[in-house]
């Protein structure tokens, strides 16, 4: 295990965590993309238990995969088992048209039709149903035999290029009717203001999600990009109804351009209110607060669910640090100021991903997984695990941290926690969307087992025969490059604190590994290109 690099500042006293089994920094299972620039691992999620066998399943996307056409996109699903994830995907689904970016967003939908099986929600933010690239959301139903081979429910955006489906989220049961509900975001939606954004709620029922939205919320300001990130918050006030987080990373308040804003809505028997019950701005120029956000469960064991919000500083001069905030739930909701903050040494244009890790150390408290993709000189990305703490919500120092070798470029682009082997300990899933091996920026997904072992998934298949012609269920031809051992960690920044948080990129800007004689100036140009294309 490498030394902790991400320092939390909820307390000034840094006490090492008690000895416990923690994940190895060698993945037990990996799966690599097979096409140049397909960016497998741009999104990864705990898909829930799709076939009801008691094991968590995992989904990951390569949104720029060339399938039926260029950049149509592809999603893989692996079912968990006592042996972990299989070498070959249990299901593979593909986008329907050029530039659909199928898999731009992924989420467990929960059980939207009440049949006892979780369902999978997929976003494709430039899907064209025949009227232009309005974007789409697609639901695949779980069952004892697996996922449906075609979507059982679809929804499309209102306008061309409004990026409907850029964010999707299963948000639990917000109205207490026994069926889980879903959100879809269209962050470029324009009505009275350009790119104000819009979010749509579809309630579950015995027949699945409603055919038209049951609730719509539209951003107030031009360029705020409301709906670029969405998350279920869990039950923050323990009233029996699940709650919702909606982010506007492009929001500008006064002189603080792109500081970001997050809205929070309580669930109720009537659904969601017309106005948010809580709003938070970063008051930090260029922070893009809410670029990532997640309901993470009960980190302190008080019976109220908690949320984590991440930032994505976008300007090369904004070097005040990458940071995440924890807001703890209570009977009255979320507090005005974060209960816990983590800050790391700054890198320009880094992007934070946050996710519920589940309970990795089996102490009954929810843990949090943080990823940070970095495209800057010789640093290739990070993943951190913070353990739950009954006093502060999360421990002051990361219990686990990994930053890989140069092949694993943009490690931490997406993260998830899932118990894939059913041992009761949550496992860590990390995407590296610009991983380079057989192909350039092919991407990779890695699983680090919660018990620290590296036994499952030792299959050694680096041939990359992942390319199938169909767009539904492919059971045996995926690539598993499980022999890659990122065994070095040369990153050692200074730790420092401050008083006091899943997305597609068409280009990573610089695909040449640092250290091969590439001029620094070229690398910086690549960074700027990545930012320009990421803020699509």
Image: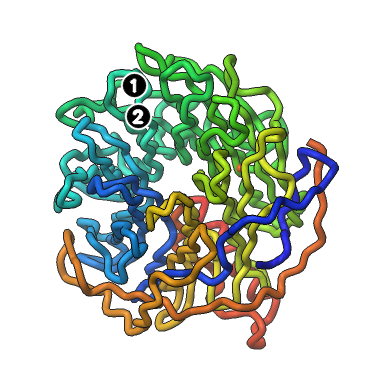
Measure the alpha-carbon separation of dots 1 and 2: 6 Å
443 relative to 72, above or below: below
Going by the picture, which residue comes out furthest to the right?
12
Q: Position of residue 291 (x, y in %)?
A: 55, 44
| Residue count near mark 2 (Cα–Cα under 10 Å), binned few <14, some 14–19, many ≥20 | many
On screen, residue 462 versus residue 335, left or right, reads left
| Badge number at residue 73 | none
Residue at 14% x, 53% y: name it: 149
Q: Where is residue 260 in the image (x, y as percent from the top left)?
A: 61, 36
| Badge number at residue 215 | 1
150 relative to 289, above or below: below
Residue that badge 2 annotates:
200
Q: Where is residue 315 in the image (x, y as percent from the top left)?
A: 68, 53
Q: Nearer the viewer, residue 128 or 371?
A: 371
Going by the picture, which residue comes out furthest to the bottom?
517
Q: Do the residues labelled 1 and 2 touch (CB within 8 Å)?
A: yes
Q: What element carries label 2?
A: strand
Residue at 40% x, 70% y: name it: 456
Q: What element carries label 1?
A: strand
Of mark 1 and mark 2, the one earlier in the sequence is 2
| Residue count near mark 1 (Cα–Cα under 10 Å), binned few <14, some 14–19, many ≥20 | some
Numbered marks: total: 2
Q: Where is residue 187 in the image (x, y as percent from the top left)?
A: 43, 38
Q: Which of 456 and 221 is in front in this view?
A: 456
On screen, residue 17 versus residue 291, left or right, reads right
Residue 40 shows in the view: yes
Residue 318 shows in the view: no
60 relative to 364, above or below: below
User: In which quadrant of the rendered view does residue 364 lie?
Assistant: top right
On screen, residue 28 versus residue 510, left or right, reads left
């Amino acid at each position: 295990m490498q030394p902790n690099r991400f320092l939390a500042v909820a307390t000034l006293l840094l006490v090492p965590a008690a000895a416990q089994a923690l994940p190895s920094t060698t993945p037990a299972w990996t799966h690599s993309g097979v096409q140049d620039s397909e960016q497998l691992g741009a999104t990864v999620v705990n898909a829930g238990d799709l076939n009801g066998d008691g094991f968590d399943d995992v989904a990951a996307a390569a949104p720029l995969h060339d399938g039926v056409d260029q950049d149509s996109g592809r999603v893989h699903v692996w079912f968990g088992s006592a042996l972990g994830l299989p070498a070959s995907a249990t299901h593979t689904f593909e986008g329907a048209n050029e530039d659909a970016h199928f898999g731009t967003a992924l989420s467990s939908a929960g059980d939207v039709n009440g049949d006892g099986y979780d369902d999978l929600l997929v976003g494709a933010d430039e899907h064209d149903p025949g009227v232009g690239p309005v974007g789409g959301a697609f639901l695949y139903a779980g069952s004892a035999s697996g996922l449906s081979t075609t979507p059982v429910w679809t929804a499309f955006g209102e306008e061309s290029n409004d990026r409907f489906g850029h964010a999707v989220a299963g948000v639990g049961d917000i109205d207490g009717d026994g069926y889980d509900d879903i959100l879809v975001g269209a962050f470029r939606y324009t009505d009275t203001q350009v790119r104000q954004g819009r979010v749509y709620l579809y309630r579950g029922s015995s027949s699945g999600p409603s055919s038209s939205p049951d609730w719509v919320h539209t951003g107030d300001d031009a360029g705020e990009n409301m709906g670029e990130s969405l998350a279920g918050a869990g039950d923050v006030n323990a009233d029996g109804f699940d709650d919702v987080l909606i982010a506007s990373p492009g929001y500008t308040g006064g002189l603080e351009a792109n500081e970001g804003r997050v809205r929070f809505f309580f669930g109720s028997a009537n659904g969601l209110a017309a106005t948010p019950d809580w709003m938070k701005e970063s008051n930090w120029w260029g922070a893009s607060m809410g670029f990532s956000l997640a309901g993470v469960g009960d980190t302190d064991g008080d019976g109220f669910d908690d949320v984590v919000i991440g930032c994505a500083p976008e300007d090369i001069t904004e070097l005040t640090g990458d940071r995440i905030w924890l807001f703890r739930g209570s009977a009255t909701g979320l507090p005005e100021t974060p209960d816990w903050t983590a800050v790391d040494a700054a890198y320009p244009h880094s992007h934070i991903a946050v996710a519920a890790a589940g309970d990795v150390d089996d102490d009954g408290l929810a843990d949090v997984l943080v990823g940070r993709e970095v495209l800057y000189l010789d640093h290739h990305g990070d993943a951190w695990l913070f353990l739950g703490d009954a006093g502060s919500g999360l421990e002051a120092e990361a219990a686990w941290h990994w930053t890989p070798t140069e092949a694993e470029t943009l490690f931490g682009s997406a993260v998830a926690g899932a118990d894939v082997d059913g041992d009761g300990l949550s496992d860590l899933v990390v995407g590296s969307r610009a991983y380079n091996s057989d192909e350039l920026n092919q991407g990779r997904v890695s699983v680090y087992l919660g018990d620290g072992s590296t036994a499952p998934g030792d299959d050694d298949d680096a041939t990359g025969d992942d390319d199938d012609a169909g767009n539904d269920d492919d059971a045996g031809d995926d690539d598993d490059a499980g022999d890659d051992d990122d065994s070095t960690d040369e990153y050692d920044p200074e730790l420092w604190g401050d008083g006091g948080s899943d997305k597609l990129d068409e280009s990573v800007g610089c695909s040449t590994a640092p250290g091969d004689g590439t001029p620094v100036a070229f690398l910086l140009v690549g960074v700027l290109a990545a930012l320009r294309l990421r803020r699509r």
